[in-house]
């Protein structure tokens, strides 16, 4: 039996022993978002409840299954029943559910979201039949929420490293051919065919080549890469092994944001486990292939997501992009051929090699094969992380999966600071590289920010331009000067000082910055501005001509006041106001002095009777 | 520079080789150990990596992670990512700035807090979020935030 077969056998034994122990299993989602929602306290509550009541059970910490608005999530498998999932579990509920289910065999069905069994169970829906999951196809996210991300055996027991094992039996050229045939395109946003990039690098004569995983997920509003690394880090590193073998790289880097401490910790742990298992280092699994991986923490510069800037940063320099060609696949890190792939791209590779290109091509649409992960955020009713086949309509994603917005939907922003805001009329756009570009946006890394009638589109454009102007590295003039000029104009529009001609001026500068900037940051920075000008022009006009913010967001254009007929005189706003500008007595309508108001919104937040209005 | 400081600095540098590629990891380690990048550290790192101080400072000031003033006892980071912005992140930042009487990037005069803006913490589904030290607080409001700050002395 080979070493690899032994590894697999041991891991399967461990996994089966865990699941067939006869003890109930409790699963708790403890990725960053779960923890932010309070999973730490829930973990403590589970432990104390089990201990105090002498209930024997296994507690397993898993990653994120993606249904973030239900965090913290706790699942229980017991008494031969399918695994049941409970959402929004706090300490109190954890205790109640465990006591009821594990002591009295009553699973508190009404409190459960669904079950993971095959057939029907007690009238509960299947978890993956919930609207949030029904139209998803989970390839990259397959293991997320099901395995302990810190245990290599769990990954191995779920067909882990099978793709890499198969790749080792193929020639590197055949691996590249398979990836090319699969038609996967870069999931970082630009959509360059992965196989083609690998081919170029493979064909370079250099003895030293590098592979870099770009985990510098800087797009605000996108967190798929973080979540995937925290939930299933091995799949990424397996993808890196296959890529390195195919292109002939001996050294690899994961360039990851320092803002993701848990993901970094899990990657380090993963690398150690791989070394111990002989899956990393010299002569991996007894082959002639040797490879090592180092982690490089980014230091907070958005532009480092651009590949030439990222290379500068790894070399210890200011992260400033350079002109291409030469492309990094020809001359990259330390002037050696270098392939830079995104986290999601690399994490898809093991599945492609294991199941074959034809299998992968069944998902998606011609020219846009496979699936894509997205983060659903903003005013979406159901926020979270999803994976859908390319070609899915935006409408399905936003209304079927995300459940629409709480208030009437206004726009969806795709592609982060490089993308655009699309209006209701564009919801039948399929999610794929070309269609999104034709609508003036981009696919980008996968943040989908839903906006409703309370979102001001001028303010949104100002936000993104401000972001790009801060993050502009300053090397080329169009981006450095152009973004700050656009910001100045947008600022004055939001302050009520907009002038006739500002819209045309913004368009002119925007097109110039797009055409003349050196790198992707500048070339795409005007997109949020230009798309909002295209689809929501009337909001700009209202700001400029009527000095009015229709969404009630731009501070200089709104005032707060209290409706006397709705005010119950509860005193809540009076104690909330930091500037003491609300006066009144108990049970009598309060009065807000607008001259002293700093427009912090505290009164609006605390009022339970909708008596505080912003206009 | 005091001997003690020198000793601690040399200990940090001892963990690295003098390759130029180590500059950012060294700066990160120095900041982790001392809380910020101070003048003498820049001099010592330049010496160690055989660069000019200008080069070291040029790199350090390029990246948002590095600070050049001492941090407060507790660090507050208000997330101003897109999802947080849409759900009121900016208002939280303004409120923090007003209550603590500091601008982003500064520390309070009593040394209790420093206030920072962060582009995205990746907890977008639970926005708006604020991080105090290593604790992330989700679905924040101006009112909730006031209560939370009382926990940090």
Image (spheres, coloured by chain):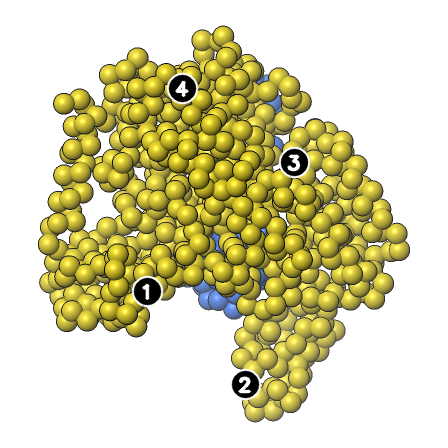
Chain colours: A yellow, B blue
N-terminal of the pair, mark 3 or mark 1, is 1
N-terminal of the pair, mark 2 or mark 1, is 1
Q: Are marks 1 and 4 in contact (CB under 8 Å)?
A: no
Q: Which residue is mark 4?
A: A174
Q: Which residue is mark 2?
A: A570
Q: Residue at x 48, y 66 (%)?
A: B144
Judging depth in this view, the residue of A127 and A292 nearest the camera is A127
Judging depth in this view, the residue of B141 and A435 nearest the camera is A435
The CA span between labels 3 and 1 is 45 Å
* Residue A172 placement: quadrant: top left
- At label 3, counting other C-alpha atoms closer than 10 Å, the crowd grade (few under 14, some 14-19, many 20 or more) is many
- Label 2: element kind: loop
- Which chain is disc 3 placed on? A
The CA span between labels 2 and 1 is 43 Å
- Which chain is disc 2 placed on? A
> Are tags 2 and 1 found on a single chain?
yes
Q: Which residue is mark 3?
A: A521
- Which chain is disc 4 placed on? A
As displayed, is residue B153 above or below residue A437? below
Q: Is residue A78 left or right of residue B20?
A: left
N-terminal of the pair, mark 4 or mark 2, is 4
* Residue A104 placement: quadrant: bottom left
- Which chain is disc 1 placed on? A
The CA span between labels 1 and 4 is 44 Å
In this view, the mark in front (4 or 3): 4
Q: Are marks 4 and 3 in contact (CB under 8 Å)?
A: no
- Label 3: element kind: helix
């Amino acid at each position: 039996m080979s070493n690899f077969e032994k590894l697999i056998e041991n891991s399967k034994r461990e996994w089966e022993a865990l699941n067939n122990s006869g003890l109930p299993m409790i699963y708790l989602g403890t990725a960053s978002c779960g923890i932010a929602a309070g999973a730490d306290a829930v973990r403590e509550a589970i432990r104390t409840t089990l201990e105090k009541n002498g209930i024997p059970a296994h507690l397993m910490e898993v990653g994120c299954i993606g249904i973030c608005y239900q965090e913290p999530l706790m699942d229980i498998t017991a008494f031969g029943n399918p695994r049941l999932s409970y959402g929004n579990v706090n300490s109190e509920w954890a205790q109640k559910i465990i006591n009821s289910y594990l002591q009295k065999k009553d699973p508190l069905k009404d409190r459960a979201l669904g079950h993971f069994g095959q057939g029907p169970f007690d009238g509960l829906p299947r978890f993956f039949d919930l609207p949030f999951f029904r139209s998803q196809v989970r390839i990259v996210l397959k293991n997320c929420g099901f395995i302990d991300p810190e245990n290599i055996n769990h990954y191995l027991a779920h067909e882990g490293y099978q793709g890499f094992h198969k790749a080792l039996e193929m020639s590197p050229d055949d691996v590249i051919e398979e990836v090319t045939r699969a038609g996967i395109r870069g999931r970082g946003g630009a959509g360059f065919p992965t196989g083609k990039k690998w081919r170029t690098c493979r064909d370079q004569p250099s003895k030293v080549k590098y592979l870099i995983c770009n985990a510098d997920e800087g797009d605000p509003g996108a967190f798929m890469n973080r979540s995937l690394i925290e939930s299933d880090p091995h799949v990424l590193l397996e993808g890196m092994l296959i890529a390195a073998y195919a292109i002939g790289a001996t050294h690899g880097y994961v360039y990851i944001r320092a803002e993701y401490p848990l993901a970094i910790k899990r990657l380090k742990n993963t690398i150690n486990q791989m070394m111990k298992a002989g899956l990393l280092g010299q002569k991996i699994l007894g082959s002639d292939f040797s490879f090592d991986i180092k982690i490089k923490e980014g230091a907070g510069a958005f532009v480092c997501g651009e590949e030439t800037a990222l290379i500068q940063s790894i070399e210890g320099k200011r992260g400033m992009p350079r002109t291409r060609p030469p492309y990094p696949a020809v001359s990259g890190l330390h002037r050696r051929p270098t392939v830079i792939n995104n986290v999601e791209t690399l994490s898809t590779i093991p599945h492609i090699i294991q199941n074959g290109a034809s299998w992968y091509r069944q998902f998606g649409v011609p020219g846009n094969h496979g699936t894509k992960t997205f983060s659903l955020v903003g005013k979406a009713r159901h926020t979270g992380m999803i994976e859908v086949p390319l070609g899915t309509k935006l409408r399905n994603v936003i209304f079927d999966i995300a459940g629409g917005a709480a208030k009437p939907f206004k726009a969806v922003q795709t592609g982060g600071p490089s993308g655009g805001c699309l209006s209701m009329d564009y919801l039948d756009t399929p999610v794929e590289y070309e269609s999104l570009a034709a609508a003036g946006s981009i696919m980008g890394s996968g943040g989908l920010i839903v906006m409703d009638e309370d979102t001001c589109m001028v303010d949104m454009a100002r936000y993104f331009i401000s972001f790009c102007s801060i993050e502009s590295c300053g090397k080329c003039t169009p981006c450095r000067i152009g973004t700050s000029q656009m910001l100045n104009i947008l600022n004055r529009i939001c302050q009520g000082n907009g002038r006739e001609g500002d819209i045309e001026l913004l368009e002119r500068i925007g097109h110039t910055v797009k055409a003349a900037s050196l790198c992707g940051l500048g070339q795409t920075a005007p997109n949020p501005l230009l798309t909002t000008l295209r689809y929501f022009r009337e909001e700009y006009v209202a700001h400029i001509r009527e000095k009015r913010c229709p969404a009630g967001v731009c501070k200089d254009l709104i005032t707060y006041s209290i409706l006397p007929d709705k005010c119950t005189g509860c005193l809540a706003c009076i104690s909330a106001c930091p500037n003491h500008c609300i006066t009144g007595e108990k049970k009598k309508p309060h009065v807000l002095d607008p001259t002293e108001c700093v427009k912090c919104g505290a009164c609006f937040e605390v009022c339970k009777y909708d008596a505080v209005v912003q206009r | 520079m005091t001997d003690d400081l020198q000793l601690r600095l040399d200990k940090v540098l001892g963990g690295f080789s003098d390759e130029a590629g180590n500059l950012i990891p060294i700066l990160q380690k120095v900041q982790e150990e001392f809380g910020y990048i101070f003048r003498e550290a820049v001099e010592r790192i330049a010496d160690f990596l055989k660069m000019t101080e200008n080069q070291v400072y040029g790199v350090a000031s390029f990246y948002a992670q590095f600070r050049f003033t001492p941090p407060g006892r507790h660090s507050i980071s208000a997330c101003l990512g897109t999802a947080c912005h849409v759900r009121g992140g900016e208002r939280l930042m303004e409120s923090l700035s007003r209550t603590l009487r500091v601008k982003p990037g500064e520390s309070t005069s009593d040394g209790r807090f420093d206030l920072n803006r962060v582009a995205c913490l990746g907890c977008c589904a639970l926005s708006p979020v604020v991080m105090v030290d290593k604790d992330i607080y989700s679905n924040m409001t101006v009112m909730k935030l006031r209560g939370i700050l009382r926990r940090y002395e």
